[in-house]
Amino acid sequence: MKKQSSLLRRMALGMVGVALAACGMVQAEETVVMDGSTTVGPIAKAFAEYYQKQNPGVNVTVSESGSGNGAKSLINSACQIANMSRAMKDKEVAAAKEKGINPIHHVIAMDGIAVVVHPSNPVKEISMEKLHDIYTGTITNWKDLGGPDKKIVVISRDTNSGTYETFESLVMHKDKVTGDAEVAGSNGHVKQRIAKTPAAIAYLGAGFVDKSVKALTVDGVDATAETIASSKYPISRPLYMVTNGEPTGHVKAIVELCFTEAGKKIIEDIGNVPPMKK
Amino acid sequence: MQLATRSLLNRCFTWLCGLSVVLMVAALFMLLGPITFRGVSSVIFRQTSEFDRMEHDLFGRGSEDKVKTEYDRMMSAAAPIFASMKAFEQELDGMPSSQRRELKAEYESFREALSELLGPIPGSESSLLARNKYGQTRWDRALVKFDHFRYVEDWVVSDHSEDGMLVKKRTPRELRFAGTKLESAFNYLDKDRLAEIMQPRLRVYLNFFTDVSHDSHFFGGIWPELWGTLLLTIGAMLFAVPMGIIAAIYLVEYATDNWMISLIRICISTLAGVPSIVFGLFGLSFFINTIKLSESKSVIAGSATLALLILPTIIRASEEAIRSVPNTYREAAIGLGSTRWHAITSVILPASLPGILTGIVISMGRAAGETAPIIFTAAVSVGAAPGILDVAHMPTPALSWNVYNICTEHEAVEEIRHVQYGMVLTLIALVLLLNGTAIVLRARVSRKLKG
């Protein structure tokens, strides 16, 4: 019996020891937390990797939970940089101000929202009106777009997504997306759904377009670096990193990375367009 | 009922039971087989010489000279391709403009396919993204890229498709360059030559478990995820085990049967049935936003949330274990003059330890594998492995979350499927290992008790 109680005591002592160790914590590393858009995600991850290589001892973490969650994180001071593929809404700014947060938007890249279909779809182009009508549910067959007689599988994004918000204001003009639309949670998810669904249509950040999907021309314009930079492509938008107040230190350096030669190259390699000027 | 009918029914039932067991085992194998096979391919695979170069650059392993010699050898083996590309570029300049424009686009696609296979083409602009700096590091991926190099995939109108959709058509890329100087590149680079250039060989990449990842999981291992999962699980145990056992002791030894206690019991049972995402949201709003356990997502907030999730299991198991200790033990201890508390610590708890450990085993596996509770409280897509001293303010990647993250949110998931399966297998192995350790521990405690 003696032995058993000593075993128990040892276990208890061990736990107390670890708990004590956990209490005496010190801040050993500097951490920059980024949260938000899945569209900005690839740029943010590449920036994080590049910045940590240049500045050993700094830990930059990136989460991709959507623009809406990025904004919420910043408002709750849960991150230093909110990656957003749309600007903060008035409501969010008001909520931030209430908590003493002063959100400042930094444009870090330009992005086009590509309209994509399965590569087997013969349709090559779409107009903004037709796109609007597909997403309101007025047009439901590819035949109306000069395609095959097939029902259109409409894929949209969750309301937390900045890409959705931009699409809603630029294409939908605040009309509601049809209830028949399938909702995907991220750019990557959209791409995988399109690559496997021949009759589907969806929209996603231009940086995500690859051979598994086909991007349509919108109003006769291809989404290329030039047309996005000049806003000739009708669904172009800036991508943001939002900080609390004017950034300083590491946060400032990361946010302004997009103006450096290295940052511009990274953005281009990922498939977005670097911002014009500060 | 006739005796014959009864025995027939009996036999049918036996067969049915046997069948269901066989089905279950088959399902298990069908599930575990591919996971194991593909998961193992993240550790044991055929590497190319680009792997050594990547490993040297990113992880500082291998000798510089050797890597350089190997790279020079590779480049000289591939030199005829680059030479014919140069010749073609000159040829291109002399062509009439309509033909040039068409061929130029084809040539761009050729260059892209080649650099994806062999790495940056000498003389081209260097990229800062590691994924563009190296050719294929794995032979299986190299073969896929080689196929993209040899064949162009087009979607064309065809008589075969009835519904007006385009069909995929593979044409050899060299046909596009027929009659030009680039043709010799295709004659040169066949599969044997590719093997000569890239030198595929078997590699056991055990560092997969201890390497950090680079360029959003394109290269490297899963150490931050593995370590994060371990920290979260151990952290959850540190919170939940003492609390759970103390609660169980109170419920069995001290509480009298009244409506309050029944209410508490009902609450615990209900808690066990709450979906895990609810715990995640609660953890965010309580641990992070309300009591500010940490500024933002952190290991400690994630552990606390996971602890809440497994608490009911631990309480329930401990309660049963303590209740099953024969009353005579208690009576004997008190009869010998021990206090109630002393009787609990020296007699009842040791006697119920095997049962309590079972509860811990079950909940430990659950804590390691849960995703939803840590999405908002601890997990990030990319980040360093936090040190023990950093758990209060650093979020962490974790296996369960990153498996999900890679398959839904990663920009190029097809390129890194092996990492994803590696993570899945590691998670399963980790849970089995944790459970195994606990089972051995339990067996030892039981033996001690008997002896």
Image (cartoon, coloured by chain):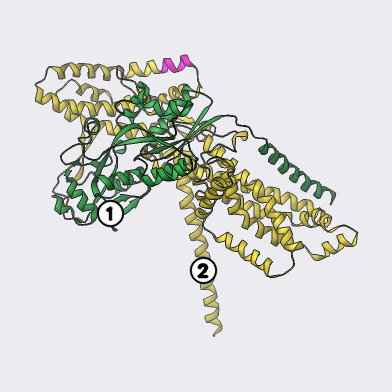
Chain colours: A green, B yellow
Nearer to me, B90 or A91:
A91
Under circle 2, the secondary element is helix
Residue visible at 78% across and 51% down? B448
CA distance for labels 2 and 1: 54 Å
> What amino acid is found at the position of numbered circle 2 in the picture?
Trp
Give the image location of residue A3, x and y in percent. Answer: 82, 48
A213 to B446, vertically: above or below: above
Instruction: Say if mark 2 contacts mark 1, CB within 8 Å.
Output: no
Q: Residues within 10 Å of mark 2 (few under 14, many from 20)?
A: few
Q: Chain of mark 2?
A: B
Dividing the image into 4 quarters, which one contains the N terminus of chain B?
bottom right
- In the picture, measured across the screen, residue B332 lies left or right of residue B289, that is right
Q: Give the labeled residue for mark 2.
A: B15
Under circle 1, the secondary element is loop
Dot label at residue A177:
1
A273 to B373, vertically: above or below: above
- In the picture, measured across the screen, residue A18 lies left or right of residue B230, that is right
Q: Residues within 10 Å of mark 1 (few under 14, many from 20)?
A: some
Q: Chain of mark 1?
A: A
**Magenta stretch, residue numbers:** B62-70
- Does the magenta run of residues contain B97? no
